[in-house]
Image: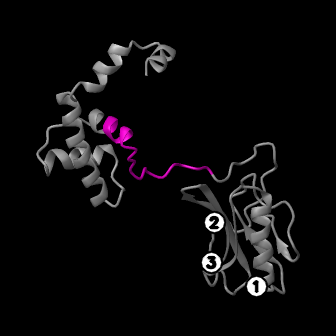
């Protein structure tokens, strides 16, 4: 032990004094509070963060405690709540591109299937990160005719969804394909889909 203390730059007597010293009142109190935090966290199905746990301890357990202390004890105990969904921007208009004309003129109705399709990208937050979902919807039936998922947001994500829509819908006429014209929109498409919208 003397060799270890010397290597770590700690006096032997200081080490034994620290080892044999009884835990402080603060340490004992922190252990009791940590157990209550664990209980509230478990009862919330591990969803509560330090703010909600603090509220629960004060109101339900009548334990006067501050948020900063709860946050510190949760970090030490490696407890974490479910955070709000982070914002993820799915498409960005490229101002250098000439905007395509809006062939629908904000009229999202159709007289028959496979006449007008609308498309968009959304995201699903997962423990491993964002999962991107591209969808093509038939305006008349309101059914998803094509979709694609990927961990990356790129042109292929959109073209796969559009290819699926063409394969499943088998349109026999020109279809107006409307999107928000973000810079991840499809740059090529199977015939006979009109992508000018």
Q: What residue did someone put label 1 on?
A: 169
Q: Is residue 117 above or below residue 94?
A: below
Q: Earlier in the sequence, mark 3 or mark 1?
A: 3
Could you say whether the residue bearing mark 3 is in a helix, strand or loop? loop
Write down the quadrant of residue 33 in the picture.
Answer: top left
Secondary element at image label 2: loop
Disc 1: CA contacts within 10 A as few (<14), some (14-19) or many (>=20): some
Determine whether label 3 and label 2 are within 8 Å by CB. Answer: no
Residue 109: mark: 3
The Cα atoms of the two marked residues, 3 and 1, are separated by 18 Å
Q: Is residue 76 magenta?
A: yes
Using residue 188 as the reference point, say whether residue 125 is left or right of it. Answer: left
Of callouts 2 and 1, which one flags the residue occurring earlier in the amino acid sequence?
Answer: 2
Q: Which residue is mark 2?
A: 106
Please report the bounds of the magenta region as a residue range: 71-89
Q: Position of residue 38 (x, y in %)?
A: 28, 51
Q: Quadrant of the C terminus?
A: bottom right
Left or right position of 180 against 22: right
- Label 2: how many residues lie within 10 Å, few (<14), some (14-19) or many (20+)? few
Q: Is residue 118 above or below residue 12?
A: below
Using the numbered discs, state the Cα–Cα distance from disc 2 to disc 1 in whole angstroms.
Answer: 23 Å
- Quadrant position of residue 119: bottom right
Residue 61 lies in the magenta stretch: no
Q: CA distance from mark 3 to mark 2?
A: 9 Å
């Amino acid at each position: 032990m003397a060799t270890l203390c010397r290597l770590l730059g700690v006096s032997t007597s200081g080490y034994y004094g620290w080892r044999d010293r009884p835990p402080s009142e603060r340490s004992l109190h922190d252990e009791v509070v940590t157990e209550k935090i664990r209980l509230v966290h478990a009862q919330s199905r591990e969803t509560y963060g330090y703010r909600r746990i603090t509220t629960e301890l004060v109101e339900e357990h009548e334990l006067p405690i501050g948020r900063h202390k709860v946050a510190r004890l949760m970090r030490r105990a490696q407890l974490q709540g479910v955070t709000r969904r982070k914002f993820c921007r799915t498409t960005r208009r490229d101002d250098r591109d000439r905007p395509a004309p809006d062939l629908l003129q904000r009229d999202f109705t159709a007289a028959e299937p496979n006449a007008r399709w609308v498309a968009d990208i959304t995201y699903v937050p997962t423990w491993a990160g964002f999962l991107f979902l591209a969808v093509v919807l038939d305006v008349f039936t309101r059914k998803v005719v094509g979709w694609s998922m990927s961990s990356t947001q790129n042109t292929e994500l959109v073209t796969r969804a559009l290819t699926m829509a063409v394969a499943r819908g088998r349109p026999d006429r020109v279809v107006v394909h409307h999107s928000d014209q973000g810079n991840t929109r499809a740059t090529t498409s199977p015939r006979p889909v009109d992508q000018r919208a």
